[in-house]
Image (cartoon, rainbow, N blue to C red):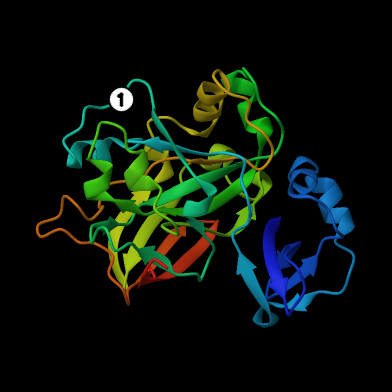
C-alpha cells in the first residue's frame, strides 16, 4: 500500500492511498490513526478516486513529533569524510520547520552557499516503541519513504554538534509517499538508493550497506526514547555527497535534485534561494 498526504482543490490536506495514477481518499482520520491501523485505513478508503493530475502531494507526515537522524551510517560515506566507522550511531534531530514536501522548493539560506544533498531512507513509525528488541522492531514500522537531508556544511561544522547545519528552514525534503512493509524486502534491505542533480547521478548506493539496519536502529533509539506513531527516522546517506568532491558540488538555485529509492519512489525538488527576511 502507498499512503499519501495530498490537497485537492481548495480542500484541506487529507490522506489517501495511491493506486496507479489515481488517489483514493481515506475517510477523515488523524495521522496517528492511519499509521497505527493500516488495515483500517485501507477499509476506510471507500470514496471515488481522484486523478493524480488534480492533486498536490504534501510531505507524507505533515507534522512529525520527532525527526531522528542517523549520521555516518554507510561505511563508504564515513570514509569519504575522513570519519571513523561508528560502533554506535551518531544521532541528531531535525525540526519540523526544516521539512518540505515533494515538488516544493528546497531553500538555500542567505547565510551559506554550501547546501549539500543526501539521499536517505526514511522510516515512519506506526506503533509506539519503547525498549523493543531488535527481533520485534520491524513490527513497529508503518512504512518507508524518501528523504533528502539537505545540509549546510559550514554550519554543520561550526561545532561538534551537527544540529545547526541540519535545521535551516525548508532544507529537508520528504516524500512523496509512505510504502508499507509488505511491498518491500524485510527491513527495506537491498534497495538501490541514488541522487541525481540536474540529471547527473552523484550518489549510487544500496541500503544493504547501512551499518545500522532498520531493525537495529529502531531498537537502539527505543532504548532511549519512546518512538510514537508519525515519528520519522532518517537512516543516513551513502558516499557521493558534494562537500568532499574536488571541486565541491553544492545545490544551487535553479537546480533540480532527485532522490530515488528502488521500490519506494522518486522524490524531486527544485532548489531556490530563501526569501529575504521581513
State the count of labels: 1
Q: Quadrant of the N terminus?
A: bottom right
Mark 1 Cα within 10 Å, few/some/many (few <14, many 20+)? some
Residue occupying the point 26% across, 27% down = 85
The answer to which of 178 and 11 lies nearer the viewer is 11
For label 1, the residue is 86
Residue occupying the point 79% across, 68% down = 24
On the image, the x and y values in percent for residue 244 come to 16, 50
The answer to which of 148 and 163 lies nearer the viewer is 163
In the shown orientation, is residue 160 left or right of residue 233?
A: left
On the image, the x and y values in percent for residue 82 come to 16, 35
* Relative vertical location of residue 241 with respect to residue 218 in this rendering, above or below: below
On the image, the x and y values in percent for residue 60 come to 63, 56
* Relative vertical location of residue 109 with respect to residue 217 in this rendering, above or below: below
The answer to which of 197 and 252 lies nearer the viewer is 252
The answer to which of 101 and 83 lies nearer the viewer is 101
Q: Quadrant of the C terminus?
A: bottom left
At numbered mark 1, what does the secondary structure look like: helix, strand or loop?
A: loop
On the image, the x and y values in percent for residue 133 come to 60, 18
Furthest-left residue in this view: 246
In the shown orientation, is residue 40 left or right of residue 261?
A: right
Amino acid at each position: 500500500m502507498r499512503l499519501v498526504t495530498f490537497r485537492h482543490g481548495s480542500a484541506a490536506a487529507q490522506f489517501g492511498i495511491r493506486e496507479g495514477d489515481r488517489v483514493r481518499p481515506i475517510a477523515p482520520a488523524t495521522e496517528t490513526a492511519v499509521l497505527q491501523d493500516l488495515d483500517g485505513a485501507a477499509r476506510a478508503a471507500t470514496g471515488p478516486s481522484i486523478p493524480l493530475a488534480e492533486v498536490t502531494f504534501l510531505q507524507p507526515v505533515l507534522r512529525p513529533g520527532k525527526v531522528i537522524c542517523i549520521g555516518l551510517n554507510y561505511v563508504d560515506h564515513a570514509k569519504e569524510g575522513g570519519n571513523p566507522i561508528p560502533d554506535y550511531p551518531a544521532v541528531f534531530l531535525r525540526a519540523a520547520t526544516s521539512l518540505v514536501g515533494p515538488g516544493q522548493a528546497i531553500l538555500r539560506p542567505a547565510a551559506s552557499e554550501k547546501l549539500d544533498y543526501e539521499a536517505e531512507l526514511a522510516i515512519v513509525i506506526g506503533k509506539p516503541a519503547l525498549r523493543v528488541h531488535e527481533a520485534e522492531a520491524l513490527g513497529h514500522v508503518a512504512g518507508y519513504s524518501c528523504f533528502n537531508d539537505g545540509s549546510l556544511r559550514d554550519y554543520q561544522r561550526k561545532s561538534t554538534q551537527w544540529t545547526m547545519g541540519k535545521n535551516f528552514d525548508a532544507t529537508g525534503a520528504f516524500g512523496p509517499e509512505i510504502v508499507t512493509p509488505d511491498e518491500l524486502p524485510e527491513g527495506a534491505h537491498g534497495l538501490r538508493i541514488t541522487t541525481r542533480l540536474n540529471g547527473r547521478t552523484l550518489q549510487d548506493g544500496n541500503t544493504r550497506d547501512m551499518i545500522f539496519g532498520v531493525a537495529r536502529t529502531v531498537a537502539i533509539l527505543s532504548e532511549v526514547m519512546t518512538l510514537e506513531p508519525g515519528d520519522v527516522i532518517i537512516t543516513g546517506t551513502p558516499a557521493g555527497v558534494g562537500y568532499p568532491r574536488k571541486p565541491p558540488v553544492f545545490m544551487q538555485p535553479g537546480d533540480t535534485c532527485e532522490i530515488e529509492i528502488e521500490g519506494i519512489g522518486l522524490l524531486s525538488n527544485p532548489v531556490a534561494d530563501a526569501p529575504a527576511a521581513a
